[in-house]
Image (cartoon, rainbow, N blue to C red):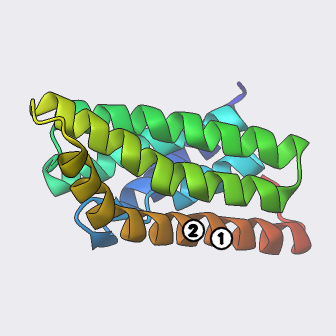
Amino acid sequence: MNTKRIVLLSLFIALSAVLANVKIFSTIAFDSLPAFLAAMILSPIAGGIVGALGHLLTAITSGFPLSVPVHLFIAIQMLVIVWMFGVLFEKLNQYIAMAIAIILNGPVATLLSGILIALLNHSFTIKTVSSFFLLMVLPLTLVSAANIVLAFIIQKVMKRARIKL
């Protein structure tokens, strides 16, 4: 990694920290927008790092409402989802990559987080998991879609304006 890439990675992390304070619902914020943008512009792994740190910054500013272990798990999910998005974006159709990322970051991540919460609370029942899922899936999916689509639009505008990072 050269100095320019380290500075850009730091810039995306800082932007994620700022957008972590733009909360939509509980810990749902616009912190992943810079992560998806970084995955498209820098590299999939850079985007994943920004995604993981961005979620942790949002969780910190929200007081870790789902517990530290759950938020660490979500940070790992973000790293993997944004990394996968970046790889698919580079190697596959960009729109398919966006659709897959929205599904993974919305319903799939919500279900996995709900299962972990139920297991940690020793209350693993279908009702517990489904209650969390039904409460969180719509806002998470909508904000995930907004983060991904806005990052895609910004990337397109930068490309048309010939802004190279």
- What quarter of the picture does the N terminus occupy? top right
Q: Quadrant of residue 138?
A: bottom left
Residue at 65% of width from left, 49% of height from top? 38
Badge 1 crowding class, 10 Å Cα cut-off, few under 14, some 14 to 19, many 20 or more, is some
To which residue does mark 1 refer?
A: 149
Identify the secondary structure beneath mark 1. helix
Residue at 22% of width from left, 64% of height from top? 26
Residue at 48% of width from left, 41% of height from top? 78
Type of amino acid at the residue the image marks with label 1: Val
Q: Quadrant of residue 154?
A: bottom right
Q: In this figure, what is the number of numbered marks?
A: 2
Cα distance between the residues tagged 2 and 1: 6 Å
Residue 47 visible in the shown view? no
* Nearest the eye: 132 or 125: 125
Badge 2 crowding class, 10 Å Cα cut-off, few under 14, some 14 to 19, many 20 or more, is many
Q: In the picture shown, does residue 134 fall above or below 41?
A: below
- Residue extending farthest to the left is 122
Q: Describe residue 132's horizontal placement relative to residue 144 as left or right.
A: left
Single out the mark in the foreground, 2 or 1: 2
Type of amino acid at the residue the image marks with label 2: Ala
Q: Describe residue 121's horizontal placement relative to residue 90 as left or right.
A: left
Q: In the picture shown, does residue 144 fall above or below 146?
A: above
Identify the secondary structure beneath mark 2. helix
At which x and y percent is residue 151? 65, 65
- Residue extending farthest to the front is 126
Q: Are marks 2 and 1 in contact (CB under 8 Å)?
A: yes
Residue at 80% of width from left, 75% of height from top? 157
At which x and y percent is residue 114? 29, 44
